[in-house]
Image (cartoon, coloured by chain):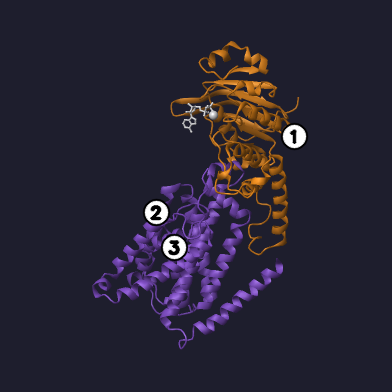
Amino acid sequence: MRAKNIILVIGIPFSLWLINHFISNPSIFSPYILQIIVLMGINAILAVSWDFISGVTGQFSIGQAGFMAIGAYSSAFLTLKYKVPFLPAILFALILSAIAGFIVGIPTLRLRGDYLAIATLGFGEIVRVAILNMPSLGGATGLKGIPIYSSFFSVYLALAITLWFCLALLKSQPGRILLSIREDEIASQMMGIDVVKYKVFAFTFSAALAGLAGALYAHWTSLVHPDSFSFMKSIEIILMGVLGGMGTIYGPAVGGMLITLLPEGLRLLLEQNPLLYQNKDFVRMLFFAILLLFFIILRPQGIFGKREAKG
Amino acid sequence: MKEPILRVEGITVRFGGLVALKEVTFSVEEGELLGIIGPNGAGKTTLFNTITGAVSPEKGRIYFQGKDITSLPPHKRARLGIARTFQNLRLFSRLTVEDNIKLAMGLPYPAFAPLFSLPSYHKMEKQMSESAIALLKTFHLYPYRDRIASALPYGERKRLEIARALALKPKLLLLDEPTAGLSHQEAISLMEELKELRKGFSLTIILIEHNMRVVMGYCGRLITLNYGEIIAEGTPEEIANNPAVLQAYLGEESLC
Ligand SMILES: Nc1ncnc2c1ncn2[C@@H]1O[C@H](COP(=O)(O)OP(=O)(O)O)[C@@H](O)[C@H]1O
Ligand SMILES: [Mg+2]
């Protein structure tokens, strides 16, 4: 048990570091492929962050892009304007988005179902509009020239730690408690569980992960723009989670990778046809919509979700 | 005189225009098995909801072991030792039978312990598994432990709810129609099991029962509710012969 953990703790970063050397070499892998692989890792973290609050705890959030924006902008602001190194900037982004999650969580988590969804949606939009109106954050033009600190190594190490933490929580008592809140809040309270406290914890943790993904994203693409964190981004994150299998953690990680990869395949097809290519954003949304419908009808539990037992 | 484990004083609960409980006052001695009967809609479940904190009374106070708990949130009352089951089962349907039980055991290690695989985490999880397995065996649920709760047959789900409530290590157990939906034979055997449990766990039990025949031989004392008011209190024999109770049950077939 302990030996296995020690091997993992040393082995995973070391393997990632080795792969990083190989994969970041432009003579072996084209920058285009590397770009896709890194974005797959970032989206996987986002999908897991959503799954933690929505799939596991049952609190439907449509505001993950808002937390991602806070992480992206806060870390970029520090590295760009104050030349802060990458690690402290990431930690700052984590803490700031966690605080945002905490503050948003306290009042909204008393809401239920649809109301919570609408409140988180509103939060995401408020963040975006606030950034649009902040000249120091670049307003509508965004921030450019952010140092490229993210790499295959840092993104996949962050993903590994995210998965480790989330899965460890899921299979232990805190995870059981969160699942019980998803299943039946009233019964959960009657079992002595402080439901509001656990929901705020889940929201804070989820927001921190989304902020982490945002920081990695900003330092990979080198520019951030309010439109990158719109309502559509939140919907895309939900799609990743639903497709992978809500409440499983690893399912949404795979979902996040697939939803990043598939449109690239689609793009290669579209490039053959100028008419379709002109409307590529539309075709992309249509593709996502069909994919979602397909899953809702044929496999509502997602790729990795378990089918619900009949009573 | 010894302080009663539960004291309910002048509780009034109103839902809009409907008075669900009206000036309800009674107390329960430690170790007692008290039965609450009354026709449908009498306010029995509402009384449990008020004791556990799911519903706030408009008037009145509730004391548990001498402590005023009227304004305590539900989870704190549960931690003090008040556990309940629900009339319409409220299991955590998509969790396993064993997890349903473990869940009620609180958080015995820091929340970050599993992240770093700390020894306290492994030790406490093992202890939790052991006590969960012991409880499951008591309730003949051990063979089902890895099944999803919603996949159990009805009778097993009812027993799982009681086992889950006991995982809280309560002092007071509130059972809302535990025998509903069971055959007379099953109902009697459940009552026998409860009798044993009460000794084993040194429990005080309040039991809501629609069917008086079931409680006759087991409850020392019965309270009858009708339209939110206590209309009779006494031994099962006294209640069975009380004209007001017979009147309340008129047109219902459940009283013997
Ligand atoms: N949450 C609620 N909101 C409105 N009315 C309620 C609520 N809970 C119970 N009632 C009403 O209060 C009365 C008592 O209900 P209940 O306590 O469930 O009765 P019993 O358990 O004795 O059958 C019923 O008329 C019921 O419709
Ligand atoms: Mg009832």
Residue denoted by label 3: A240
Chain for mark 2? Answer: A
Chain for mark 1? Answer: B
Residue denoted by label 1: B202
For the point 59% across and 65% down, which residue is it?
A164
- Name the N-terminal-most of marks 3 and 2: 3
- Label 2 – label 1 distance at C-alpha: 52 Å
- Does any portion of residue A102 appear in the rendered image? no
Residue denoted by label 2: A297
x and y, in percent, of residue B135 in the image: 70, 43
Which amino acid type is marked by label 2?
Ile
Chain for mark 3? Answer: A
> Label 1 neighbourhood size at 10 Å, few (<14), some (14-19), many (20+)?
some
Looking at the rendering, which quadrant does residue A123 occupy?
bottom left
Q: Quadrant of ligand 2?
A: top right
x and y, in percent, of residue B90 in the image: 55, 40
Q: Which chain is purple?
A: A
* Helix, strand or loop status at disc 3: helix
For the point 58% across and 49% down, which residue is it?
B95
